[in-house]
């Protein structure tokens, strides 16, 4: 039986990993032994036992309790603790997700111990190396053995970087295998979307109706830590709320709430007096899924929310100058508005009038996790 470490470091990765866990406990329970390791990169008050039970997600078997810190200190501590864990557990494979410091640390520790790395969400590129996530995802890709790209764009990015799609077994760090696999988060959205319907009282509690509100999330530091960018975004949101009389629901990250104290006083006063701008505490994953399903338009700087808006057939405004999910922009269902007030307003007005958007199945058939597990068992 193949022993696999499923390594995560933050709540979004726990949710991503749950798709693999469901596949293992379903079709691969006799072939794969799973050990879930949480680095503790992000301490999350929402990660109670109820969170795991509600989402049918296995609790981590091991928590390394690394905690926060500068990139160097945090990553260094994680590498040391992950290395110790790999020595104790003795896995055959390490599965990693996305682009966090946990992904970087896990890939370096495993690769240097000659343990094959499987990277899920491989090939994603923003082409902005000022973003730490870009450094993390590139590094992880180039020490991985099996690389699963959710999109054809990511697959082509890997080829451009020298990965050879014609490689044949046996696969290893010097002879990796790349796939256009589909996206496990599409698997999850289908699975959790049904469970999320149990939260139907949320819209009533917020005083909103289905398809009659805008969902807004802001959490990336290049927006929250720059008062000018944040002010420009909120100026646009106020204009939209006032002009179109549409509620805006903002489940704001604590970083964004703290940063709002640095906004100009006059702008802060307008925000606090605007009844259509509803700033709420962060919501649970299932509540977020329900808000995405019920929103008329989504605005975000989150990569995950961009994709989920597509899964639920919603137009998306992206508060970034670039995105790793370029197929959404090329398709015309997402627009890069950066933190430009006029672009935000214009894009909102465009999507408000459009009724003929199409949402192709860029991200697979909803069975990506099973495909990944099959390839792991057959090749590693």
Image: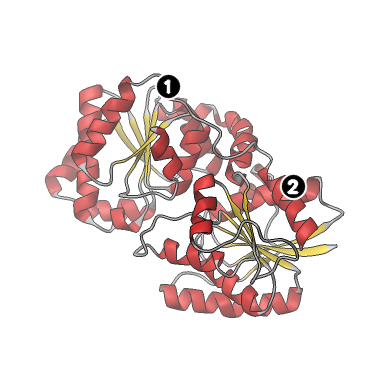
- Compare residues 224 and 356 and report the one nearer the observer: 356
Q: Is residue 274 visible?
A: no
Dot 2 corresponds to which residue?
Answer: 23
Q: Which residue carries the number 1 mark? A: 209
Q: Nearer the viewer, residue 170 or 232?
A: 170
* Badge 1 density bin: few <14, some 14–19, many ≥20, Cα 10 Å: some
Mark 2 residue crowding within 10 angstroms, few (<14) / some (14–19) / many (20+) = many
Dividing the image into 4 quarters, which one contains the N terminus?
bottom right
Q: Which residue is drawn at 43% across and 28% down?
A: 295
Residue drawn at the location 79% of the way across and 49% of the way down:
25
Q: Is residue 185 above or below residue 90?
A: above
Q: Is residue 23 above or below residue 177?
A: above
The local secondary structure at tag 2 comes to: helix
Residue 45 placement (x, y as % from top left): 51, 56
Q: Can residue 3 be seen in this view?
A: yes
The residue lying furthest to the front in this view is 166
């Amino acid at each position: 039986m193949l022993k696999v470490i499923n390594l995560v470091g933050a709540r979004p990765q726990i949710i991503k990993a749950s798709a693999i866990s469901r596949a293992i406990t379903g079709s691969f329970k006799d072939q794969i032994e799973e050990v879930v390791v949480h680095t503790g990169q992000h301490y999350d008050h929402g990660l109670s036992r109820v969170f795991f039970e509600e989402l049918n997600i296995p609790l981590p078997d091991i928590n390394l309790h690394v905690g926060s810190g500068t990139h160097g200190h945090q990553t260094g501590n994680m590498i040391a603790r992950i290395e110790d864990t790999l020595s104790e557990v003795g896995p055959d494979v390490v599965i990693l997700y996305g682009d966090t410091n946990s992904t970087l640390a896990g890939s370096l520790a495993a690769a240097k111990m000659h343990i094959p790395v499987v990277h899920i969400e491989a090939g994603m590129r923003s082409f902005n190396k000022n973003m730490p996530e870009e450094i993390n995802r590139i590094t992880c890709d180039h020490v991985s053995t099996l690389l699963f790209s959710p999109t054809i764009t990511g697959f082509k990015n890997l080829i451009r970087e020298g990965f050879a799609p014609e490689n044949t077994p046996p696969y290893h760090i010097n002879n990796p295998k790349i796939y256009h696999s589909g996206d496990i988060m599409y698997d999850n959205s289908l699975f959790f979307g049904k469970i999320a319907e149990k939260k139907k009282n949320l819209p009533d509690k917020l005083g909103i109706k289905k398809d009659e509100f805008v969902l807004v999330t802001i959490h990336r530091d290049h927006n929250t830590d720059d008062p000018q960018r944040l002010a420009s975004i909120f100026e646009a949101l106020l204009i939209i709320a006032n002009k179109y009389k549409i509620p805006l629901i903002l489940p704001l990250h604590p970083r964004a709430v703290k940063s709002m104290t640095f906004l100009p006083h006059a702008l802060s006063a307008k925000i606090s007096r605007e009844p259509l701008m509803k700033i709420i505490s962060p919501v649970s994953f299932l509540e977020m899924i329900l808000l995405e399903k019920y929103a008329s338009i989504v605005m975000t700087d989150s990569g995950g929310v961009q994709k989920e808006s597509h899964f639920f057939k919603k137009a998306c405004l992206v508060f970034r100058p670039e995105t790793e999910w370029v197929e959404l922009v090329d398709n015309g269902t997402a627009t890069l508005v950066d933190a430009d007030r006029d672009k935000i307003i214009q894009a909102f007005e465009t999507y408000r009038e459009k009724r003929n958007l199409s949402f192709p199945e860029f991200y697979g058939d909803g069975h990506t996790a099973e495909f990944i597990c099959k390839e792991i068992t057959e090749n590693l």
